[in-house]
Each structure stands twice: as C-alpha cells, then as structure tokens.
Image (cartoon, rainbow, N blue to C red):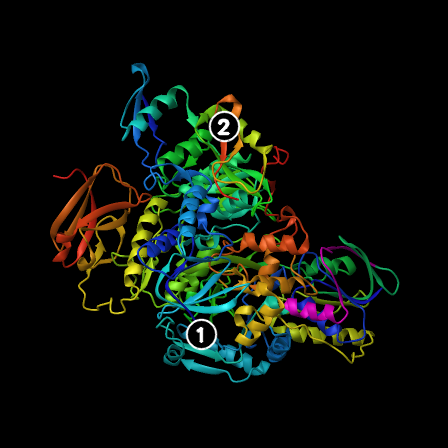
Amino acid sequence: MKHLICIVCPKGCHLNVDEENGCSVTGNGCPRGAEYGREELTHPTRVVTSTVKITGGAHRRCPVKTDRGIPKELVLRAMELLDGVTLTAPVRRGDVALPNVFGTGVNFVVTRDL
Amino acid sequence: MKEYDVIVVGAGPAGLAAACEAYQNGAERVLVVERDKEPGGILNQCIHSGFGLHYFKEELTGPEYAGRFIDLLRATGAELLLDTMVLHVSEEKEVTMVNPRDGCFTARADAVILTMGCRERTRGAIGIPGTRPAGVFTAGMAQRYVNIEGYMVGRKVVILGSGDIGLIMARRMTLEGAKVAACVELMPYSNGLGRNIVQCLDDFGIPLYLSHTITEIRGERRVEGVVVSRVDGRGKPVPGTERFFDCDTVLLSVGLIPENELSKEAGIELDPRTKGPAVYENMETSVPGIFACGNVVHVHDLVDFVTAESRRAGAAAARFCGRADAWDPFEPAVPLENGENVGYTVPQHIRPGRIDRYAEVFFRVKRVFGDSVIEVSDGGKILSSFRRDHMAPGEMEHIVIPKRLLQNAGKITVSAKEGKRN
Amino acid sequence: MYDVTVIGCGVVGAGIACELSRHRLSVAVLEKENDVACGTTKANSAIVHAGFDPMPGTAMARLNVQGSKMMEALCGELSVEYRRIGSLVLAFGDGDLETLRELFRRGKANGVEKMELLTGAQALAMEPNLNPAVAGALYAPTAAIVNPWGLAIALIQTAVKNGARLHLNAGVNRIEEAGGFYRIGTDAGVFETRYLVNAAGTHSDEINNMAAKPFFQILPLKGEYYVLDKSQGNVVSHTIFQCPDQNGKGVLISPTVDGNLLVGPTAEPADGPDDTAVTARGLAKAAETALRSSEKINFREAIRNFSGVRAATEKDDFILGASPDAPRFVNAAAIKSPGLSAAPAIALEVCSILRDMGLPLSRKEEFIPWKKHKLFRDMTEEEQKEALRRDPLYGRVICRCETVTEGDIRRALRDPIPPGSIDGVKRRCNAGMGRCQGGFCGPRVHEILSRETGMRMEKICQDRAGSFLLTGETKTGGAEK
C-alpha cells in the first residue's frame, strides 16, 4: 500500500494506492485523483513550467508550459531543450514554443502575450 | 481635477477583477492605476501552474490567469494608467499619483478600491545573525530575477521557510540548474500545500528540515554558507544542534505583510491581526466609499479567492457610486471575533441588511487539525457548525453564515475545535 | 607626485581631503573599498555628541566640542541632513545620579554649553515614553543627529569638485620613504606623495606600521544595532543615553534623520578590524538593555540589523598628530566615538599639523561646495515641476517605501563620485532603506545601474567588490552551471 499526496489540485488529498490490487486508489476527493494515484505509481508525469529567451518583447524571457504532463524522468532533459529556444515577439498565449518534446506529442506553449 | 466613479489602486489580480466588476455593475468612469509598466501584478512572475482551478475549472499559470482578466479589463471602457505610483489617498477619496508623462497630479472618485497587495518579510525583520553578504534574497525577489529578467541568483541554495513561495522557488532554482541543499522550516509542519512538497521537494530529493531555522549566515562578500539549528517548542535554537550547509544563496520565504501605507494615510482602521483594513461584508473599509480586496486585506493562498473577494468589492463600489447617502452610521453591524484556535476573520463586521442570503467568512486556524469542527456562536449560543477532516494555518478556510442567523446576533465568534461533531 | 595623500575615505579622511582642497595643493585620497564611507562611517550611531563624555584635557574632548559647534554650518553648506534634537542621559538610582553629576562637571570643563540636570519628572515630561522609574537626566540641548555617510560623501565630492583625486579599490600594501617623498604601493598602482595622512580607521595601526615604528594597536570593538521602522521613529524625540554600569556602556535609543529609530550599540571585542557580523547574543543584549530606557520600543518593527567596528586602543583618546618617527606623516588614527562629531575639527587640526610640518597652505579664491541633492519627494511643487521638465523620470517612483524616483538615481549617477553598487545608490538616494529593504526597488535599481553605466547585470554588486548578486543568465545551455 503506497501513501501519496495528490498533486492534481491544491486540495492535496491523501491517497492510498494498492499496488497489489491493480493500483486501486482510496482517499481521492475526485476521479482525477484516482487516475493520478494509478499513474504516479506506474508512469508518473509532470507538467513543466519554465521560461525561454525572447527577442523584441517587453521582457527578455517568455514563460512557457507543457500543454500536458511529460514523463517525470524527462523533466530535467526537457529543461535542457528549452535552452536552445529563442522566440521572437510578438507571441500569444498558446503559441507553440517547442513542439513534441522527445516525441511525446506534448508541446511547450507560451503562457503570456509578449 | 479629473473625476471618476471608481479609482482602483493596483492592476494585479485583485484590481483587475474589482475594476471589471465595477464597470459591469454600472460604474462608467473607472480608472485603474498600476505602478509597474504592465498589468498583472505578482502573477506575471508566477510562471508555475495552480491558478484558476476553482474559478475557471482549469489549471492555469499565473500569467495565463492574469491574461484572462487583462483581456476582460481591456474589453471594458475602464482607463488603465501604467507606470504610475499612487502617493496618497485621502479620506475624501482624492488620489494623488505620479508618472513620467503627467508628473504629479490628483484625481477624485466617488469610490476607491485599494489592492496594493503585500510585501515579503525580510532578513532584517527576523534578525538572522551573521554577516551581511550578497546572495540573501526574499523568494519573491529571486523569482523576479529568474522569471522576468532571466538571471540566476545563485548555484547552491538553502531556503528558509516552507511556505508555497519557498517551495516553488526550490523547484524553479533546481530546474534552472542550481542545487538546493535544503528547505528549512521553523514550525513542526510546513505551511505550504501538500502538492508543493511533492512536486517541489520530493521530486528532486530536496530535504525538508522541520523545526529548524538558520542561526547564522556566513560569507564576506557573497554568501558562503549557513548554520542551521533545530528549535525547541518555542522556536528557540537548541544549542549543540548546529549544522553547516555550504551554499552561495539564501532564499527567504518567511511571511507576507499586507502593504497598507496608503490605507493608514487615508485614516482607514487596520486590524492588527491581519495587518490589513478591517472590512465589512462587501469589502468596504471604515471609510465609507473606500473598499479593499486581495492580499492587502489578508494574505491569500489561492488567487481564485482573491478574484471572488475582489468582484464583491467591485460590485459594492459600483453600487456606492452616486448614492452619496449610502452610508448610515446607525446601520446595524455585527462584529466578528476570532475564538478558540482561530487567528482572524475577514470580514471583521457584517451588516445583515446588506446581505442577500448568506455572508461568506474567511479565516485561518492557528495550528494543524485533523478531524475538527468549526463553530459559529453568538454569546454562548452555537448558531452553526461545520465539519472538517483537515485544517492548517497555511490553508485559508471558508464558511457561509445564513442571513437569518446574523439578523439578531450580538457578536459572532468563529472557533475551531478538535474532534468530530457530536 | 601629490602634495598630500590621505589614506582612508571615511568621514575623517573625506573631511581632511575637503579641508585640504580649499588650498592650492594637489591632494589624493586612497580608499581600499569600491566606494567611500564603507567602514565605521556607515555603521555608527549617527550622533553629534555634545561633548560631556570625553575626559577633559584629551584631544577627544577638545575636538568633540569644536566639531560639534562646526557641524551645523558644515551640514548647511553641504545640504546634509542634520537635526539638533538634544540628548538625555538617564539615571536610575543613586550611582547613576552621581555619574550624571560627573558628566556634567566634565561637560563644563570641556566647554559644553546649556547643559541641565533634570529630575525624573522633568525627564518624563520631555519624553513621556521613558521608563517611569527614571530618577534624573542630564539634558544636553546641543547634541544632534546627522547623516554620517551622507556627510562623508558630500565632503569627498566637494574635495573632488575642487581638484582632489579619489582612488577607489586602492588598498595600501606598502609605504616607502624614498627621500623627501613617499612611494605608496596599492591595489590600484603606485602613488607618490610628499605628505601622508593616515585616516585608515580600524586599519590605521597597520598603515602606521608600514611607514613608522608601531606605537599603538587597534583593538577593534564591535557595536551591534537595530534599525526600526519609521512608525517607531517618535517613541522618543531626543537621543536617549544610559549611564555605564558594571554590565557595560549602556545602549542608546535615537531617532535618525530619516525618521527611523536606532537602538544600540553593544560593545564587544570584534574578530578583527572588519568583523561586522551581528550575533544573536549581541542583538539580544542590545534589545534587553535598550528596553530599560523605554518599554515602548516595539522590536517587532525592526527592519534591519547591522554592526560597526570602532577603532579603539587601550588609551581613551584619538591618536592625532605628527608621527613620532616618520617625517611628513600625520596620524588621524584610532578615531572612535566621538570621531564623527569631531571630524570637522579633526580636519582643521590635521591641516594645522601639516602646516607646522612645512606644507604651504594658501587658500584658493574659489571653493565650490558640493551640495547633497534634494530628493524629489522633498522638493516644493515648483521644484518638482522643474525637475520633471529636466528629467521626466523624476516621475517614476522606484523605491515605494521611501518615494525615491528614477530621476533622483540618475542624478546621483552624474555626480563626481557616482554610486557603483546597489548599496551605493542606497547611501546617496535612500532607495532600499525602507521597510521592504529593497524588496521592490532592488531589481529596478539594479537594472537602472546596468543601463546607465553600461555594466552588465551580473557584474553589479550589492556593495563591496565581489558581492555580486547574480551568477549568470538562465537558459545558457548549462554554460554557467
């Protein structure tokens, strides 16, 4: 039995995940928590937020995020990918800054109009 | 002198929501004054997600959340004055401000909404001994450098304070290539959200030292390390428990203080428990026609609640405008008191005549609770109670009190008690 | 070849340079740090003492009283903040009352004017927040508060404006008498000078020993302080001293020229001439001792701690005079309290000693004082409109707590000795001195410095050389890691 704190929303429900029992989850306050509990034990993912260089904008950095979670073990390598990105203003929320991270189908998207 | 219906001081999440709501409720001449060169407030540097889960039912980053309200504001006829610092707000609702283009000038409004937010507690305020090298930052200042300006503030970090800002920066610094040696927390529990302990500390193997504090900062010109000691039940360092951590950076996440200089100068009564204005159910302060909302009233954990509170203030400000006789000194108001285990409540007084069906009351408990009960009482009589399975000082609580229970109340006390309700 | 070189640019060195610059001389000042006033001058009680404390007959006593008399006019000439708020030394009990009488006698002998011995009731009438157990007080209306680093900066900028040369980052390593002149080896190169003045503060024994036989030793004495928020600034309206007792010298409470409250100092041996660390014990002692004067001090309103090191020796007097064995060498050494108060008089005294040694002093016809700039917030409406016309950026407030504008900062950057660090800006313009301690203005001041001086953000320091704030950029592909 594994004890986890759900990270899907700020409530942080305390989950109990039974690995022996097909990862059944108890303690979740909503269905997303059950899904998180299962995933966290089998193939954990994380949404990554960071910044990339941008030229011609009001600031030197533009905030970005992955539009979905990527495998947790790829997070630090994904950060290295971002080092090589330079956007050119103007950009809008939702623009793709870096597509298909490591072939996962997940994109880094812009989160601020600059 | 230019005249407005409503002047909003600050274009962060509170000011943006208040201004939009004021406009949508009939205030035509609305001015929003922002000291920074762009609207959005602190959200612009909060590039992480966790915003909007309640309000939009989506998880957004800070800039995205701010962006939605900036779009809403720009769609109204409200005037947004950027790069402008409000220097003074008078009791007569005259707002003096200054900017490079217009110099120093004053405008008058029927209603003013204060949303100046808060500042961070500093090293000087908590008196950490040692030398004073460069490399000691509040977490928010480091966040600004890293996220907005694009600079790293250090390579080896120790973080004091395990509130959300400290935890978020632990992750941020790690993702940008720094090594975070430890997160040190004075209390025996963390003030931050559980999810942040997981995704900011556990994910990166950053140790959390509860019941510890930094007792010395070392370094001649730049931080060279810190001494961390365990503390006793009263928060005093225990001799003999000192540990040295090699680091070049200290981030302080040791508390937020509502920024109320302008409120004080306007003669507004402040609540020493919150350090913000004492407000009524509609976010009106002790000065009729001056409203306040957001972190300037009490420090929030979730921006979604800031938005809700600010919309309330904006709507109330719009209703106030034009009705110069709106304030009645004899209007009955029920004071709220913090009872057992409760630190403060917002609002601090409720005028039952102004409520539709129920009043929303926000408060914080003084310690961590498991199974517990929130009790709302009047004198000795319990009016209502609410069950909780977990409460903590770091998580603002929210209850509603029906109008009928307030109508004849003398004084409402909100308390928190251990155990299940009988 | 300089006529005179002054080693050390604290308030004493700057004052000497300023006085020298009134005469037709080539003057140099060598300062080891990257800015002036970085030693004891920026970390003291900021008091211009009336002069009843030093022993009669000492140079300290004479120069304290003389300097104190000169200070108001000097600050007026340079537009440096000065307020004659008066001081009270409190007595609790008979031992203290005897001490007050002794201080009164000393004051009279030293030529201090207008002192009065007050009863406890009279003291409380003047200062209602004092400990009601106060048994009596020595009132000295001639005591004042000043801006010590502001004074030092104004003095050296005046000197430079009138021809003196300031060399920063010029720590002295070697002094060689080369036959009628001195050759001085520093971190910034070699300098030659006929006459030499040692105003090197807590390092003044080291400097003496480079040129002459050792005859004094600095025993650095640390004093720790609290600075409290302006909301505490009117707990008292005079400087409040305590009588020394078996526990030590007592601790003062004083308003500052900016409206804050200063509490301190302690007095413990420092770990070396530059040991400015604050200690938990020292701070606790300062607070506990101060509360004896007034319980109304609210330490929860503290905004900063600092400590300063005094250049003390075993003697209780300045070491001021021609060197016993090195020719054309003057010591203005071991200047501990009342050094700040005495500084204007020390400057005159050093010039007099130099003249007696043979330095020709002939006054220039034209001498232009450099006046400290009025901040936008302190200007009249007319002055503000004029400032905005000159530079619209007087309309951009950078430091919210202290209402300091970008125009104020840009103006300081055009001065003879402009700021080169975040704290350099703070010392000249007050940005960062408020309750948020630079939390809001820090990154903005940083950016302004970078833009206006062309220095890269990563190269700009908090204060001393090497106190860089940033370690590099984000997103460099790991190059900086």
As shown in the figure, which amino acid type bears the numbered disc 2? Val
Q: Disc 2 marks which residue?
A: A75
Q: Is residue C36 above or below residue B64?
A: below
Is C164 in the magenta?
yes
Q: Chain of mark 2?
A: A
Q: With B50 as the anchor, is C468 left or right in this view? A: right
Query: What's drawn in magenta, residue-wise?
Result: C152-176
Apparent side of residue C333 relative to residue A13 in the rendered image (left or right): right
Compared to B73, does B29 lie above or below?
Answer: below
Amino acid at circle 1: Ser
- Foreground disc of the pair 2, 1: 2
Badge 1: chain ID:
C
Nearer to us in this view, C298 or C326: C298
Q: Is residue C443 visible?
A: yes
Which residue lies at the image location 78% right of the left edge and 81% below the top edge?
Answer: C365
From mark 2 to mark 1, how far is it between C-alphas?
59 Å
Rendered image: mark on residue C237: 1
Location of the C terminus of chain C by quadrant is: top right
User: Decide: marks 2, 1 in contact (CB < 8 A)?
Assistant: no
10 Å crowding of disc 1: few (<14), some (14-19), many (20+)? some
Other residues around mark 2 within 10 Å, as few (<14) / some (14–19) / many (≥20): some
Give residue B400's position: percent from left, percent from top: 21, 47
Give the percent coordinates (x, y) of residue A39.
37, 22
For label 1, the SS is loop
Q: Dot 2: what SS?
A: helix
At horizontal 31% and vertical 15% (from top left) the residue drawn is A22
Residue lying furthest bottom:
C114
Residue B29 is one of the magenta-drawn residues: no
Locate the N terminus of chain C by quadrant.
bottom right
